[in-house]
Amino acid sequence: MDYMTIDGIKVPMEGEKNILSLIRKAGIDIPTFCYHSDLSIYGACRMCMVEDDRGKMFASCSEQPRPGMVIHTNTKKLQQYRKLIIELLLSTHCRDCTTCTKNGMCELQSLAYRVGVHAVRFPNEKKPLPIDMSSKCIVRDPNKCILCGDCVRTCSENQGIGAIDFAYRGSKMQITPAFGKDIAETDCVGCGQCAVVCPTAAISIRTNVTEVWDAIENPNIRVVAQIAPAVRIAVGDKFNIPKGENTMGKLVKALRIMGFDEVYDTNFGADLTIIEESKEFAERLKSGEKLPLFTSCCPGWVKFCENKYPEFAGNVSTCRSPMSMFSPVIREYFAEKDKEEGKTTYIVAIMPCTAKKAEILRPDNFTNGRQDTDIVITTQEIIRMIKQVGIKFETLHSEACDMPFSMASGGASIFGITGGVTEAVLRHLSPDKDHATLENIKYSGVRGKQGFKEASVTFGDRELKIAVVHGLKNAADLLDGIKAGTAHYDFVEVMACRRGCILGGGQPVPMGPTTRTARMDGIYQVDQLSSIRYTDENPLIGRIWEDIIEGREHELLHRAMETEVHA
Amino acid sequence: MLDKSFYEKADEIISEHSRGKESLIPIMQDIQAVYRYIPPELLSYVAKKIGITEAKAYSVATFYENFSFDKKGRYVIKVCDGTACHVRKGTLILEKLNSELGLKDGKNTTGDMLFTVETVSCLGACGLAPVMTVNDEVHPAMTPDKVTEVLNRIREDQGGQNE
């Protein structure tokens, strides 16, 4: 095997594409702003500079490793070089760290500390640019941008949207939508993946924490929380809990301490989705119309389809997302009680997703003219709230959700990961539900991290063709294939974020390779440990269905199609 | 919304090029040759036609000083501010132009849409410094007095409509 020497450590070369990967393999955390393993290499930030044994400096991210190379990552020259770059970046950067949403999590802040910048010699002569608050999902503050281009590449390479790009040049360069438009006027779907990769607060999650505290404070409001499947395996990230561990019980307890009146599991809503979407799928198979059926759980995807592929909008399931099915059912459940007690029910959805903040405002997610979900806060925001209160999350004793929505199937819990919706629907539709059959579905091809997955399943007397994609670029490629007539499917699951909601725009960052794998394992563990594996076994569904839903499926569980799509 | 004729012209220009991202710059140049600027709506239109995002097209268009989204006057005057012209008092030429045409505060096109004044970093005619061009016609060894002459001549050509 070939070797190269990094800071005196002999490192074996195992097909790494760049020197940076080898440096990290050697256990050295070389700093970067613009390097993300799933994006193209850009080489803009110059943080990963190294020096060879002849004193030549180059960026390790964009240099191929060669056997026998001798590399130093931390010479005096490099230290000064990095320090100067950070100083120059800071010279045109908003430095109100104490009031910044990224305070304590900002990569620029932590690197400035790490490389030892204690003063900035250059005055900031840049005129402040306006902050873009037009989106319900994200906030753009160009004054905090360091032009690493991570957001630009994520939006175009992974999501196939390209709502923002570099504009102008030199010291006037900025990242912006075309013609300096508001982000809300572009094709942005609100997935928040740009905020995930942004090292500073140039793009951050639009926060709604204040609204939630206000509701909790008001004695006339019944504050009800519903918690999405992907939140429970990520919320522990910021409380020294091992990555991917299910902390649902602790989260329920924390919400009760904070003053939430009722705490429910969105997985119950996912069970409702499984029933309705399976029904819809069976009907479409029978009629042969509007196939393939596209899933509708992911608001980023639904918006993407409407924006870029309106011809397929009719194929998207009319089912609401689990969150949006669950909210009107909760509201119905409390309708009488609210009247008796003179209270209003206020539904807070805790989601891994930024696009959900826009989903709740869509007219097709209103019931009888009323917005169903009152507010969406992301995993990052609930972490903030827990920290505000000062709850020692890691030491909490677990508690269960409130009845009558406290039980859900394992199938529902995997809605948070790519392939999960499909797997849950297949479990539901499968006539045999013994252990072996369920295990077989697992291996049908729906699981895994590949961006594009295909599966073929026998259903009755026919063979169903299924596709599972995540990352909107993959969705676009698939749709192009269907349009061109080269691809044929009966059922297509799409999730806007790579690997699904577990890496959603509202989840705690960073989300490196270890976190990604841990979250995937974590969510499958939740399913594996559920005594109820598929929806039919959920004993609570029957009662709720009878009491609340029966006969009102269209009103409560489906999107009102007349107000929608091209409006 | 632009008049239909703009889009027809754009279609005509696009049809002369291949439909790929590599055609963006040549198409923008051709559009600018026709209108003396790029109507923003047309940039978005072209981007869609050749399959790139509007933001990407805007990125390219703003990178090059040569492309403009602002309507320009019938006569585009470019004053050289390269080293040779600068040391031979090119700045005075620019000042004279601005004061004669009443241009200030970043405004560089006259209200009657007759003149646009721009600076360029070098026209490549350093031997003739200080240089300016009027619609690609070169005026060498300029002086403030010659500026008045040139402007007057153009105004006369326009039939005295600006007096």
Image (cartoon, coloured by chain):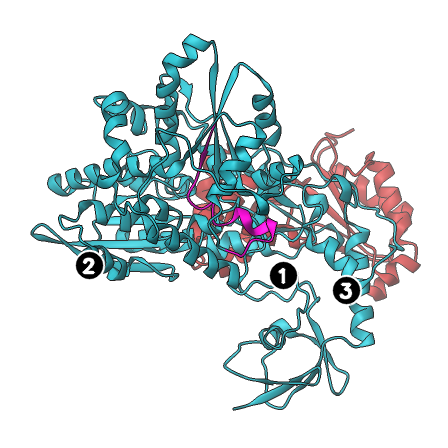
Chain colours: A cyan, B red
Instruction: Say which chain tag 2 marks.
Output: A
Question: Mark 1 to mark 3: distance in Å?
Answer: 38 Å
Q: Which quadrant of the rendered structure holds the C terminus of chain A?
A: top left
The verdict on residue A238 being magenta is: yes
Is disc 1 surrounded by few (<14), some (14 to 19) or many (20+) residues within 10 Å?
many
Question: Mark 2 to mark 1: distance in Å?
Answer: 46 Å
User: Which residue is disc 2 drawn over?
Assistant: A436
Tag 1's secondary structure? loop
Q: Position of residue B130 (x, y in %)?
A: 86, 57
Instruction: Say which chain tag 1 marks.
Output: A
Picture layout, residue A161 above or below residue A221 = below
Viewer-nearest residue: A490 or B131:
A490
Q: Quadrant of residue A467?
A: bottom left
- Observer-side mark, 2 or 1, equals 2
Viewer-nearest residue: A206 or A243:
A243
User: Which residue is disc 1 drawn over?
Assistant: A34
User: Which residue is disc 3 drawn over?
Assistant: B124
Tag 3's secondary structure? loop
Is disc 3 surrounded by few (<14), some (14 to 19) or many (20+) residues within 10 Å?
few
Tag 2's secondary structure? helix
| The residue positioned farthest toward the front in the image shown | A397
Q: Position of residue A529 (x, y in %)?
A: 35, 51
Q: Looking at the rendered structure, which numbered label has been put on residue B160?
A: none
Q: Are marks 1 and 3 in contact (CB under 8 Å)?
A: no
The verdict on a common chain for dots 2 and 1 is yes
Question: Mark 3 to mark 2: distance in Å?
Answer: 79 Å
The reply to whether residue A321 is in sight is no
Picture layout, residue A396 above or below residue A117 = above
**Amino acid type indicated by mark 1:** Cys
Query: Which residues fall within the magenta stretch?
Result: A224-243
Instruction: Say which chain tag 3 marks.
Output: B
